[in-house]
Image: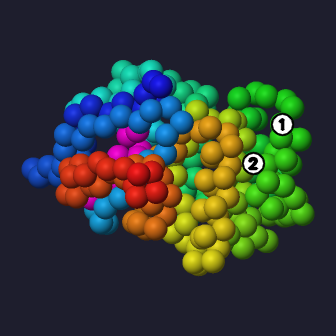
Amino acid sequence: MSDILVVENLKKSFTTGDKTLTVLDDVSFSVPEGASISIVGPSGSGKTTLLGLCAGLDVSTGGSVSLVGIKLNALSEDDRAYVRNQYVGFIFQNFQLLPTLTALENVTVPLELRGEKQYKKKALDLLDRVGLSDRAYHYPSQLSGGEQQRVAMARAFISSPKILFADEPTGNLDEETANRVTELLFDINRSEGTTLVLVTHNLDLAAHTERILQLKGGKLISDQKSMRAV
C-alpha cells in the first residue's frame, strides 16, 4: 500500500520584528492510503498548523509535504488549490457553511467548482446518509450545530476525496451530538475508503483512528497505534 501523505523534516516559523516563533520543528511521518490517523496535543502545540501544511493551505518554512505523490512546496497557490479541489475533503470545527445557500447547495459546492453537472442526486443521497434528507432546502441558520456539521460532512465526501482532513470536527458539539457525528464520520469514511487525518484534543475521538501522533511544542513526540488498532 503506497503512502498518500509524506511529511519530511517539516518546519514552520513566523517572524515578527526581530523575533522568530517556531511552530513546527522537524516533523516527519507518512500515512498509507486508506489509513486513519489522529494528531493530538495541547493548545499551541502546532496541530492546526500541521494540518494546514499537509492539506496545502499554507507552505512550510523548511522540509516538504507530498500529497497524492505531488510535492506541495513547489506549487503555486493556484496549483495547490487545484490539488485540494481534486483530491481533498475538509471538515472544520466551525462548519464553514455558506449562509446564503441551502444545505443541498452547500453540499454541491465542491462539484460545481469542478464544473461537474450531475451532482444533485449524489448530494441528496449523501444528505440522506447523514440523516438530513428532510432538511435539504433549509439554510444553515435554520439548522442545529449537529445538523450543520452533518451537512459539512456530506460536503466533504461529495467529491469522493482521496484524503479527508478534519480539524476538531466535534469541538462545537455537545457530547450526544458529537458521538453521533463521530459514528457517521467513521462509517462513511470506512465505506468510501478515504484516508482520514484528524486533528483533535479529544482523546476518545482520537482513539477511533488507527494511529495517534502526539505533538508538543511543535515537535512530534509520539507516533503509536491506537488501542483499537492493536
Q: Is residue 104 above or below residue 31?
A: below
Decide if residue 77 is in sight here.
no
Q: Give the labeled residue for mark 1.
A: 119
For numbered disc 1, what is the local secondary structure? loop
**Where does residue 186 sit, x and y in percent of width and height?**
61, 53
**Where does residue 40 sit, x and y in percent of width and height?**
35, 58
Q: Is residue 64 above or below residue 230?
A: above
Q: Residue at x 60, y 70 (%)?
A: 178
Decide if residue 84 is in sight here.
yes
The answer to whether residue 98 is left or right of residue 211 is: right
Q: How many marks?
A: 2
Q: Residue at x 76, y 58 (%)?
A: 130
The answer to whether residue 141 is left or right of residue 138 is: left
Do residues under tags 1 and 2 come within 8 Å of each other at their CB atoms?
no
Q: Give the labeled residue for mark 2.
A: 107
Q: Residue at x 82, y 61 (%)?
A: 132
3D distance between C-alphas at marks 1 and 2: 9 Å
Q: Residue at x 67, y 39 (%)?
A: 192
Q: Which residues are magenta?
A: 45-54
In this view, the residue in front, 52 or 32, is 32
In terms of image quadrants, where is residue 183? bottom right
Q: Name, please, the residue furthest toward the front.
A: 230
Q: Which mark is residue 169?
A: none
Magenta stretch, main secondary structure, is helix
In this view, the residue in front, 143 or 150, is 150
Among numbered discs 1 and 2, the one appearing first in the sequence: 2
Amino acid type, label 1: Tyr
Q: Is residue 47 magenta?
A: yes
For numbered disc 2, what is the local secondary structure? helix
Amino acid type, label 2: Val
